[in-house]
Image (cartoon, grey):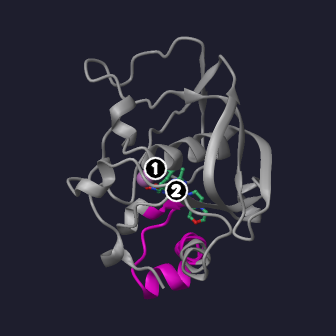
Amino acid sequence: MIVMKDIIREGHPTLRQKAEEVKLPLSAEDQKLGEELLEYVKNSQDDELAEKYDLRPGVGIAAPQINISKRIFALHFDEHSGENLSLVAVNPKIVSHSVEKAYLSGGEGCLSVDRSVPGYVPRYARITVKGYTLTGEEFKTRLKGLPAIAFQHELDHLNGIMFYDHINPNDPFQEVENASPIDLQAETVE
Ligand code: NB4
Ligand code: NI
């Protein structure tokens, strides 16, 4: 299973690389990689397991974050979060997006960033995405709200982009034109 020591931190060159497309159909190795990424996210949201293995909670993780420069990431929102989404995306793409933007009013964090970087991270409010599942089927779906934000955060990792690259350095909490804030429930962004 993936634990925190497997997760590379900012400054590691792999986090600034453009990750490689995955050959389809997926090899057993790449299927296992996808399963392990999803397992990490699920484990990190399980209080007991997170405590036992000292896992930072997350709703997503991308292969470059465990130093594998491949275009695969996992997203998992448990039933309690009201966002029923649990997926492993292979060679994901944004095929279209809204003009309207959105941002987490509490800002973003990252498992590869061991510090708080306050500020709004403007992203597209609604996106149509496509990619492949671990079994090689193509999927196409529309996302909005936190799942849309998280998908873009993970896709950025496949392109060597960190969330704070989007923060206005002069005024991190400057009002974002044509954008709506997303307030997460009580749960803070870690
Ligand atoms: C990715 C997210 C940062 C902003 C929003 C949030 C958490 C991450 C990073 C968009 C994507 C990880 C991957 C959370 C969290 C809410 C749901 C369910 C029960 C606890 C969990 C806490 F942990 N971000 N952490 N950061 N990243 N929500 N939640 N809760 O997920 O670096 O590239 O378990
Ligand atoms: Ni991240």
Per the rendered image, the range of residues in magenta is: 36-63
Is disc 2 in contact with disc 1, using a CB cutoff of under 8 Å? yes
Q: Nearer the viewer, residue 101 or 172?
A: 101
Q: Quadrant of residue 55?
A: bottom left
Q: Nearer the viewer, residue 78 or 28?
A: 28
The kind of residue tagged 2 is: Arg
Q: Say which residue label 2 marks.
A: 71
Q: Quadrant of residue 10?
A: bottom left
Q: Residues within 10 Å of mark 1 (few under 14, many from 20)?
A: many
Q: Nearer the viewer, residue 132 or 109?
A: 132
Q: Secondary structure at mark 2?
A: loop
Instruction: Say whether residue 48 is magenta.
Output: yes
Could you tell me residue 77's position as x and y percent? 68, 60
The kind of residue tagged 1 is: Leu
Q: Nearer the viewer, residue 30 or 190?
A: 30
Residue at the spot 27% in from the left edge and 60% down from the top edge: 9
Up the image or down, 71 lies above or below 24; here it is: above
Up the image or down, 146 lies above or below 56; here it is: above
Could you tell me residue 130's position as x and y percent? 72, 45
Q: Is residue 114 visible?
A: no
Q: Say which residue label 1 marks.
A: 158
Q: CA distance from mark 2 to mark 1?
A: 6 Å
Instruction: Say whether residue 44 is magenta.
Output: yes
Horizontal relation, residue 152 to residue 95: left or right:
left
Horizontal relation, residue 43 to residue 7: left or right:
right
Residue at the spot 20% in from the left edge and 53% down from the top edge: 11
Circle on res. 170: none
Up the image or down, 176 lies above or below 80; here it is: above
Could you tell me residue 142's position as x and y percent? 78, 39
Could you tell me residue 101's position as x and y percent? 60, 22
Looking at the image, is mark 2 or mark 1 earlier in the sequence?
Answer: 2
Residue at the spot 66% in from the left edge and 46% down from the top edge: 147
